[in-house]
Image (tube, rainbow, N blue to C red):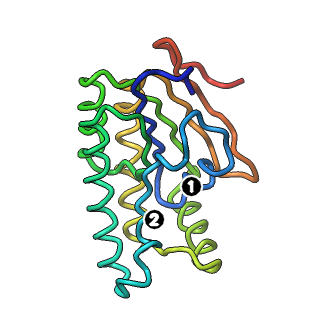
């Protein structure tokens, strides 16, 4: 993380089930957690009002998109969690960069789509949300294909491996250089 730039966009990305939320809530980040936009949290807040989980998640996704765009236009610092499996989030990051935002990118992977799916199934047993297996696998490949573009765009980046018993930093981008962690 960087030393408090005027306009910071923190992107926490990684495949479904990689451990993005776990990283956010167990790591000291230089941004107020209230300013990290997470569709899962929005969806949980709607659970009493909207019973259908797919409809609830669609509304949460739409609400998060509106909030991201509003904060961007206001020039506020914020962060968001994303699977990063679609071009639109990368385009959003490019737009932020063009508006003078410092891009801090945190990427978390569990190594394989099988491991991600296994982690999701554990999460479901504890009351968390499910993701269909076919979506986990297809999104995993797309997410990994976007990783180089995010690394190139970011001012600072950390890539974490969450496939084992604890998070392990794989590499960091700082001052335009990517360095592997020994």
Q: Is residue 38 left or right of residue 162?
A: left
For mark 1, does the 10 Å Cα neighbourhood hold few (<14), some (14 to 19), or many (20 or more) residues? some
Q: Is residue 161 left or right of residue 44?
A: right
In the image, residue 129 lies at what x, y percent? Answer: 50, 74
Q: Quadrant of residue 76?
A: top left
* Residue at image coords 36%, 60%: 138
Q: According to the image, label 2 marks what residue?
A: 40
Which is nearer the N-term, disc 2 or disc 1? 1
In the image, residue 51 lies at what x, y percent? Answer: 37, 87
Q: According to the image, label 1 marks what residue?
A: 21
Label tally: 2
Q: Quadrant of residue 63?
A: bottom left
Q: Quadrant of the N terminus?
A: top right
Return the residue nearer the eye: 180 or 1.
1
* Residue at image coords 55%, 51%: 20
Q: Secondary structure at mark 1?
A: helix
Q: Quadrant of the C terminus?
A: top right
């Amino acid at each position: 993380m960087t030393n408090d730039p005027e306009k910071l966009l923190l992107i926490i990305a990684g495949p479904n089930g990689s451990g993005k939320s776990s990283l956010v809530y167990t790591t000291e980040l230089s941004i107020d957690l209230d300013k990290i936009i997470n569709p899962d949290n929005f969806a949980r807040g709607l659970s009493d009002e909207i019973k259908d989980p797919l409809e609830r998640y669609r509304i949460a996704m739409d609400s998060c998109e509106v909030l991201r765009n509003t904060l961007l236009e206001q020039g506020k610092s914020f962060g968001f969690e994303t699977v990063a499996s679609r071009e639109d989030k990368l385009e959003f990051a490019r737009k932020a960069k063009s508006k003078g935002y410092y891009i801090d990118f945190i990427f978390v992977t569990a190594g394989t789509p099988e491991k991600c799916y296994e982690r999701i199934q554990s999460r479901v047993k504890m009351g968390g949300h499910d993701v269909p297996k076919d979506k986990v696998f297809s999104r995993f490949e797309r997410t990994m294909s976007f990783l180089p573009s995010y690394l190139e765009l970011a001012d600072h980046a950390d890539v974490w491996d969450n496939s084992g018993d604890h998070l392990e930093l794989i590499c960091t981008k700082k001052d335009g250089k990517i360095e592997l962690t020994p």
